[in-house]
Amino acid sequence: MESATKSLERANQPAVNSTTNITAFKELGKAIRTLFLLRYIDEIALRKTIQSATNKSEEFNGFIKWLFFGGEGIIAENIRHEQRKVVKNNQLVANMVILYNVEKMTHVLKDFG
């Protein structure tokens, strides 16, 4: 019974530890970010990997914009969940086009070879 009372008392104390934890995590985040930046500067392979992934992502975004029908890529909806639907549906269409192209190219290469 005493331990339960002490637990309740601790739970009702001011959030000093919470503030300390938040500050500690912020500082830890800064240290992790600094280590990453130093590693990024030092390692050419890491920079190439990140650049490659960024380029692929930008190419896919360009493809999605090219596929977007109506409104020249501008989403006319003002409601957030409706905007998300439009984005997800457009990504789905892009993935379907990519899959279709891969499937057709595979058949052509099989027939050719």
Image (cartoon, rainbow, N blue to C red):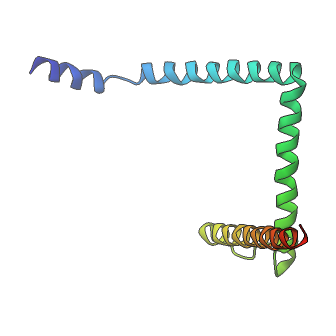
Residue 68 location, quadrant: bottom right
Residue depicted at x 50% and y 21%: 21
Question: Seen in the image, is 104 located left or right of residue 22?
Answer: right
Question: Seen in the image, is 85 located left or right of residue 63?
Answer: left
Q: Where is residue 23 in the image (x, y as percent from the top left)?
A: 57, 21
Q: Where is residue 32 in the image (x, y as percent from the top left)?
A: 69, 21
Q: In this view, does 95 lie above or below 56?
A: below
Instruction: Give the camera-side residue of 7 and 42.
Output: 42
Residue 2 location, quadrant: top left
Q: Quadrant of the C terminus?
A: bottom right
Task: State the residue lying farthest toward the front.
Answer: 113
Q: Quadrant of the N terminus?
A: top left
Residue 39 location, quadrant: top right
Q: Position of residue 10 (x, y in %)?
A: 28, 21
State how many labels appear.
0
Q: Is residue 35 above or below residue 84?
A: above
Residue depicted at x 63% and y 66%: 80
Q: Where is residue 66 in the image (x, y as percent from the top left)?
A: 88, 71
Residue depicted at x 73% and y 24%: 33
